């Protein structure tokens, strides 16, 4: 049986970058491996893995890779051990699950280069250690290394925080992430594959107008939403809250810059929370302790157990109904006082007569 690898990965840029980088490299090097890649939302890895491990499809797979995520439940690890023994690996970097990964160190691929790692950079490090990875030409190696660094820099937010990072890499990281989120998730794999098949200079030249348009649109979006920031206190700490369904990282960091008296920002989407810290508060701990999420000390996320849009719509419906009821009650009182002199009262009387 030829090697068939099932990969479960997160559905952000780093989560797509990690598996499709591996698939791209091994395709170019003509490795006889089939990859089945499935990307999923944060917090769903145990649910999805559990369902898949109990399905007939899992019997057709030789290896399982988990990227940019770590299972939260020991039962999931037991199932992996039972069905795949030493043929499953985790490529993850999130601080909140480091202790869990340490308990299964034999099945965890760790970064080998210093600094903040991402799932994509861990895969890249691993490729360098494999004998077949040395067969890339110098030009391809350089092009792929640049993609990896841009994805890593954005995912860890080093593109903003690392003082020594070249301006060209900061720009690439920023623009690449904007492009990724511009396209619908159902074509993200196609987008990432197209990027990895070429080099950044060529790709940017071909998409310059789109990139400039996205930069302008983002600035307008941020200005609009920054007007609606609300400051509040949570667990004794000063926070800011703002709603957004796009540009969450950018909005979080801009909010921190414009509200220096808060320690962290909560960017709320329809069913999720994106948390950003100024370094004084560990938002990964907050996300894990209170909301069942996780991440890094300065950037974390979690899901919420209701839909913010639906809740807002229901609140608006209730408000409108109260307004109409109050108006109708007032109109009825006025009609009584006026002895049905209004046209509406006269019409009502006519209908009663009929």
Image: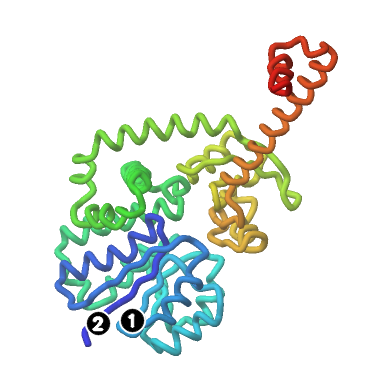
Query: Residue 79 location, x and y as percent?
Result: 47, 85
Query: Residue 101 location, x and y as percent?
Result: 50, 76
Q: Quadrant of the N terminus?
A: bottom left
Q: Which residue is mark 1?
A: 63
Residue at 31% x, 82% y: name it: 61
Which of the two residues, 334 or 346, is positioned nearer the viewer here? 346
Which of the two residues, 254 or 345, is positioned nearer the viewer here? 345
Which corner quadrant of the image does residue 348 belong to? top right
Q: Which residue is mark 2?
A: 3
The vertical placement of 140 against 238, above or below, is: below
Q: Quadrant of the C terminus?
A: top right
Label 1 close to label 2 by CB (< 8 Å): yes
Residue at 25% x, 67% y: name it: 23
Outermost right residue: 337
Residue at 77% x, 9% y: name it: 341
User: Would you call the spot at circle 2 few (<14 residues within 10 Å), some (14-19), or many (20 or more)?
Assistant: some
Residue at 69% x, 34% y: name it: 321
């Amino acid at each position: 049986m030829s090697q068939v690898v099932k990969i479960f990965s997160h559905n952000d840029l780093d989560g797509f970058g990690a598996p499709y980088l591996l698939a791209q490299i091994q395709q170019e090097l003509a490795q006889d491996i089939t990859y089945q890649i499935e990307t999923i939302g944060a917090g769903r890895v145990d649910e999805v893995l559990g369902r898949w491990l109990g399905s007939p499809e899992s019997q057709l797979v030789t290896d399982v890779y988990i990227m940019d995520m770590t299972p939260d439940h020991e039962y999931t690890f037991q199932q992996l051990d039972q069905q795949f023994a030493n043929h499953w690996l985790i490529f993850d970097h999130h601080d909140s699950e480091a202790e869990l990964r340490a308990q299964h160190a034999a099945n965890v691929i760790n970064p080998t280069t210093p600094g903040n790692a991402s799932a994509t950079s861990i895969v890249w490090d691993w490729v360098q250690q494999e004998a077949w990875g040395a067969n890339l030409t110098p030009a391809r190696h350089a092009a792929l290394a640049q993609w990896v660094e841009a994805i890593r820099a954005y995912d860890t937010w080093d593109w903003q925080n690392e003082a020594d990072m070249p301006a060209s890499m900061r720009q690439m990281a920023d623009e690449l992430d904007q492009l990724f989120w511009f396209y619908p998730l159902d074509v993200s794999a196609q987008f990432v594959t197209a990027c990895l098949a070429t080099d950044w200079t060529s790709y940017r030249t071909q998409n310059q107008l789109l990139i400039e348009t996205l930069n302008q649109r983002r600035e307008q979006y941020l200005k609009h939403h920054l007007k609606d920031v609300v400051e509040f206190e949570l667990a004794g700490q000063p926070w800011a809250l703002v709603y957004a369904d796009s540009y969450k990282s950018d909005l979080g960091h801009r909010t921190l810059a414009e509200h220096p008296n808060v320690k962290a920002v909560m960017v709320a989407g329809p069913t999720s929370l994106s948390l950003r810290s100024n370094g004084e508060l560990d938002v990964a701990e907050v996300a894990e302790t209170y909301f069942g999420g996780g991440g890094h000390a300065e950037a974390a996320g979690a899901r919420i157990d209701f839909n913010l849009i639906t809740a807002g719509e229901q609140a608006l419906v209730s408000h409108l109904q109260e307004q109409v009821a109050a108006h109708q009650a007032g109109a009825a009182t006025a009609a009584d006082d006026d002895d049905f002199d209004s046209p509406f009262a006269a019409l009502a009387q006519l209908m009663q007569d009929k």
